[in-house]
Image (tube, grey):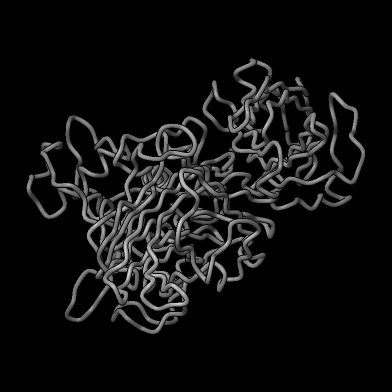
Amino acid sequence: MSLRRLVQPPLPFVILVALHASLGSPVLAQPARGLPLSENFDGVTPPALPYGWVATTPQGSEFWVTDSSKPDSGPIAAHLNAVSVPADERLDSPPVAILTARAQLRFRHAYLLAVDPGSLPESIPVALAYLEISISGSPFEDIVDAGGAFVEGGYEHDAWTGEQPMPEYGSVIVDLPESLAGKTVVFRWRLTTAEGPNGPGSGQWWIDTVQVCDGFACDAVPQPAAVNVDPSGNGVWEPGEIVEVDPVYVNNGSQALDLTGTITNLTAPGPVTFVVADGSASYGSVAPGAAGACVVTDDCYLLMADQVGTRPVQHWDVQVFETLSTGATVDWALHLGGSFGDVPASNGFYKSIETVFHRGVTGGCGVGNYCPGNPALRKQMAVFLLKSKYGAAYVPPAATGVFSDVPVSDPFAPWIENLYALGVTGGCSTSPLAYCPDQAVRRKQMAVFLLKTRYGSDYAPPACEGIFADVPCPGAFADWIEDLANRQITGGCGNGDFCPDDPNTRGQMAVFLTKTFGLALYGP
């Protein structure tokens, strides 16, 4: 979805018939994500970090945690405790897909970072705080070096140091580089302490209320955050079905906002009949910093899109233009299901398959089919994993010839070698180094693939407890399998078993990917 003004006047209609194919299909705007990242750290039990946030310390003794020592909004904030030795402490966000050239990052923070007065007349900073970014899996670099620009709350002397006036928080707003459109990024809050003339530096840092705004400035009011479609059904909008559409907005202003909306236009490729059974919605009074949802007022949209003739395109989205009472217009891109001839709505994997297709993780197995019962091969898994993590636009580095059974000319070679370089896999044998690209991925292997891709090659799952009858604990894969189960990504294969040696089907893989990487069919 992208926030933009409509150039055409609103079209009064209850039923609209689109242009026929002979007149050409409309060109659809690329949807933005609204708020692809919004985190106030209040939904966890300290010291745990929210799902997808990762704390690391290659040098030092402290880790980023959550606590209630100094929150800015709500009861909890992310906090790095006092560091009084040379250290390098890092807090990484989940991967964030950026879809427009108009994206901003903003957050609130407070810090107490030591400077050493041992070299007068200027003090020497011995505790320095930075904001870094990794773009499409590349090494982290400073946000400014990557092309970002501070709008508010930028560095002092190429970093944050000294003291953010206590006990107040300060705001940081960064315009992200336009070149990030279509890429996936990870943000890093990094604190380093060094040895000064009078000893090691020390520092504390609190982070709260982190948001990425995609397609509009972070101070825009209100901000689209999510949209739920067909909540009382299977969660997928099928052609010819009247569905409920429930947008959600966040009020980032300083005053309560009485918010309403209307549907003013719909477009989609091909000849389509649109029905607006209910074209108005009310979000009620939305308090500053709160989210407003039309389901709370029980006043949401009812829409239908029906094809005239055959399905015009396989990946079929409807652009739904909502005009808010503030005067802004939001463009929601809503996917129409029924994409694959061999995956009917009755298929248990249906929504997950539509989701990975819509998110560009896979295009299916060919000729309009997905082949949900076929095994997921190791070479396919490399593509599935990297696109799920970094986004549909991700392109891995060129292959150099790492594995004896994966020639450089193989179209899967760059993906397989990228997975190897990230430390997710070591292949299937070491002498010679081989990957076995055409073998099926076993369910036990899948657990390691998913968690290492999601959390990094250094991730170590908690010790197993013996959840599944057919997974010995301790065992080579038991920790990984049980971690996946504890995250509610899998419930096993039934009857208290996991079936670790069974191959993963493509249908099962769609579920694993959507749950592990938080992929949504609609909205951010």
Task: Farthest residue to the front: give it.
Answer: 121
Can you say which quadrant of the picture contains the C terminus? top right
Residue positioned 90% across, 33% down in the render: 11
Residue positioned 61% across, 34% down in the render: 227
Q: Is 253 left or right of 109, judged from the image as shown?
A: right
Residue positioned 87% across, 50% down in the render: 22
Position of residue 7 measured from the top left corner of the image (x, y, whole percent) = 89, 46
Task: Farthest residue to the top: give it.
Answer: 298
Residue positioned 39% across, 71% down in the render: 117
Q: Is 508 left or right of 469, judged from the image as shown?
A: right
Viewer-nearest residue: 228 or 417:
228
Position of residue 181 measured from the top left corner of the image (x, y, whole percent) = 63, 61
Can you say which quadrant of the picture contains the N terminus? top right
**Picture quadrant where residue 143 is located:** bottom right
Q: How many marks?
A: 0
Q: Is residue 376 visible?
A: no
**Picture quadrant where residue 466 is located:** top left
Position of residue 340 measured from the top left corner of the image (x, y, whole percent) = 55, 44
Instruction: Decide: is 429 above or below 272.
Output: below
Viewer-nearest residue: 5 or 314:
5
Viewer-nearest residue: 490 or 175:
175
Instruction: Decide: is 410 above or below 512.
Output: below
Position of residue 160 measured from the top left corner of the image (x, y, whole percent) = 48, 63
Q: Is residue 26 visible?
A: yes
Q: Is 197 left or right of 185, judged from the image as shown?
A: left
Viewer-nearest residue: 182 or 315:
182
